[in-house]
Structures are given as C-alpha cells and as structure tokens.
C-alpha cells in the first residue's frame, strides 16, 4: 500500500485545512499542525510554537533525505503477526533526523532537534489511527531529542499535586489511573509523563485527555468490554474520554508529590502493599523506566542520571504490590493516598 507523500484530497476535504493553523498543548509543549490533532483540545491562535507536526507529508527534499537515513538505530523486539518488527528506526550519520517505520505502514520523520515531525500512512489507515502513534512514541521521541526527561508513567492530580504511577508496559499504570478517574481525581497523563524543574519543584506536564485501556480492564472496571468505545476497528485498546461528564483532565502542570513503582501483582491477602525503596533501588527504577534513553548518548545519559539522582532528594519513591484479584483493585487508591499523606513533604488535599 502506498504512503501519503502529500495531503490527499479526501484529507483536506474531511478536515478542512485552514489558513490559521490549529494549536494544541501536550507534554508541556505548544504544538502547531497543518490539521487539528484528533483527541487534543485546541488552543487560541498565537505566534510561535515549540513543535510543528506535518500530517500527510514527507519532509522537503525527501528523496535526497531518505538516502541519508540509512543507519539502523533501533529494531523492536516485538513482532507483528507476520513476524516483522513492530518498529524499526533509522537515522543519518549526523543524527540530524530519525525515521520511524511501523510494520503497519505508518511512518514518522523526526528532526534531530525535536522541533518537527512529519507523518505519512497507508491509504487504508486514517489520521486518527496515525495519531495514536504520534501522541505516544513519536512525541516521546521528540521530547527526548529536546533533552526532556520522560518517564513511562501515568500521572494523577490529588489536590494541587501529582502522583506518578511508574512502570513498564503491562504494569497496570493506566488501570490504576482509571481507578482514580472513577473516583473523581483529574488525570494529567497516561503512559508518558514529561518532567521539568521549576525552582525546587519537579513538575509533571499534562499529556492527552484520555486513557487507553485493554478490554479485560474495561470489563473489570466497568462491567463490560463494550462499556468504552474503541476509536478504530483494529485498535487493541478502548478509550476513556476524560473530557466527558463525571471525568476530569488536568490541563496545567503540577508539582510531583510522590512516585509509586507498580510491581508484579500478588495473591497475598495483605495486598495492596506499599514499601519504601532504598535510594539505589529507587534510582535504578527511575533509570529503567525513562523513555528512549538510547537517544541521549553516553554523555546525555550521564547527565540525566545525575538529574534523576538529585530529584530523589525532593520526591519519595515507593514500590506498590497490588492484588491479583481485580475486584480488590479499588483498595489500591486508598492505600496509595494514605501512604502519600504519611510520606509527602507537603500536605495533600483530596478532591
């Protein structure tokens, strides 16, 4: 199937490409695009942006540029049903750009400074489908190229502070965030949390206003796999819209109060359990759950290691063991909240 090299007619007709570019805020960046980004609220027009997204286009002078993007950078250990790597990344010798190619045909080119992203996809797929990759790996890639620290985590607002739920894929970050959302707590971000410093505070920035949940999680939390929509027919995950009634999306950054590392679940009757983490173990947990650290190089990883070590002096890191019984999952929220009240340096106010 062919990939879109220019914005096709059906795309401009459906989305009405405008003279005034749509703007969005995501991961602490002001983003402009040639089309509205599905799933992101729009911002009022204003001069300037931190990052530009170009849908349905390759970069200028693509034929010459493609010849330079021949250095293999990364091959995913996960394969599709045909045995092909889910993601392959190439770069140029000077690291001036990166080309991300997914096995389903979606492609991104990310400039080396993390200020431009181009996206193309096969005819059979859609803008909404490609956006699923954009709001996750592609933007995560760009953030790392810009030197931003990103964790594999979900972030929940409790009062005027944020709790981070840390862990690799499958750890239950989104499930725990959904439990908090059901109880009325605003959600800042799902899967990727971008961090920055504001004086002594460590800030977590909002991502996109929905959670992506596996069907079995939807069934456990909402009673039926069909309780939440699946935006695309061939998507594996359902979407919990945080802009709908009874849910809340935190639109501004918040200081991080505590970080909770989700461990493998246990059948121990005492679960959920929360334990302190020694400094060395906590630091290794943060390092292991940073996003795309191989982009940084040896010197960049060394600097980031120092930043993470310094942050441990500001924010407690705790490890959480949830129960294997899904019916006991709601207890996890109470356990985390009670623990944070006892270990956080600043008082928290529940919503």
Image (tube, grey):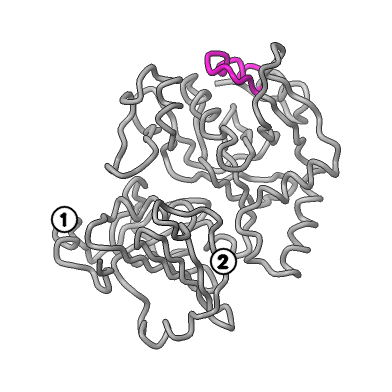
Q: Is residue 280 left or right of residue 67?
A: right
Tell me the residue at 63%/36% (across/down): 164
Q: Give the residues in magenta.
A: 322-336
Q: Nearer the viewer, residue 237 or 254?
A: 237
Quadrant location of residue 148? bottom right
User: Is residue 334 highlighted in magenta?
Assistant: yes
Magenta highlight: main SS: helix
User: Is residue 107 highlighted in magenta?
Assistant: no
Quadrant location of residue 36? bottom left
Q: Position of residue 147 (x, y in %)?
A: 63, 63
Tell me the residue at 36%/57% (across/down): 23
Q: Position of residue 311 (x, y in %)?
A: 77, 47
Disc sitting over residue 74 in the figure: 2
Q: Position of residue 271 (x, y in %)?
A: 69, 17
Residues packed near mark 2 inside 10 Å, few (<14), some (14 to 19) or many (20 plus):
some
Q: Which residue is mark 1?
A: 14
Q: Earlier in the sequence, mark 2 or mark 1?
A: 1
Q: How many marks?
A: 2
Q: Classify the position of the N terminus by image quarter.
A: bottom left
Quadrant location of residue 331? top right
């Amino acid at each position: 199937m062919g990939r879109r090299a220019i914005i096709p007619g059906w795309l401009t007709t459906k989305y009405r490409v405008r003279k005034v570019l749509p703007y969005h805020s995501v991961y602490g960046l002001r983003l402009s695009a040639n089309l509205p980004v599905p799933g992101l609220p729009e911002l009022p027009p204003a001069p300037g942006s931190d990052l530009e997204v170009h849908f349905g286009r390759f970069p200028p002078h693509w034929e010459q540029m493609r010849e330079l993007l021949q250095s293999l950078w990364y091959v995913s250990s996960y394969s599709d049903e045909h045995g092909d790597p889910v993601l392959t990344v190439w770069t140029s010798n000077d690291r001036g750009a990166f080309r991300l190619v997914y096995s389903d045909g979606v492609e991104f080119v990310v400039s080396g400074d993390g200020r431009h992203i181009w996206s193309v996809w096969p005819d059979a797929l859609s803008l909404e489908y490609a956006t699923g990759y954009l709001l996750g790996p592609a933007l995560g890639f760009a953030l790392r190229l810009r030197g931003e620290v990103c964790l594999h985590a979900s972030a929940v607002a409790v009062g005027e502070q944020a709790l981070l739920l840390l862990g690799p894929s499958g750890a239950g970050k989104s499930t725990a965030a959904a439990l908090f959302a059901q109880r009325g707590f605003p959600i800042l971000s799902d899967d990727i949390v971008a961090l920055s410093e504001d004086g002594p505070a460590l800030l977590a920035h909002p991502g996109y206003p929905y959670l992506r949940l596996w069907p079995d999680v939807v069934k456990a939390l909402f009673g039926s796999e069909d309780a939440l929509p699946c935006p695309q027919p061939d998507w594996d995950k359902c979407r919990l819209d945080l802009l709908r009634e009874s849910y809340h999306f935190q639109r501004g950054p918040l200081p991080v109060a505590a970080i909770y590392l989700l461990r493998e679940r246990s059948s121990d009757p005492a679960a959920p359990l929360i334990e302190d983490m020694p400094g060395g173990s906590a630091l290794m947990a943060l390092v292991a759950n940073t996003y795309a650290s191989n982009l940084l190089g040896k010197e960049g990883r060394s600097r980031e290691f120092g930043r993470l070590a310094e942050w441990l002096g500001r924010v407690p890191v705790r490890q959480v063991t949830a129960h294997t019984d899904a019916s006991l999952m709601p207890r996890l929220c109470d356990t985390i909240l009670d623990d944070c009240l006892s270990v956080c340096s600043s008082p928290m106010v529940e919503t």
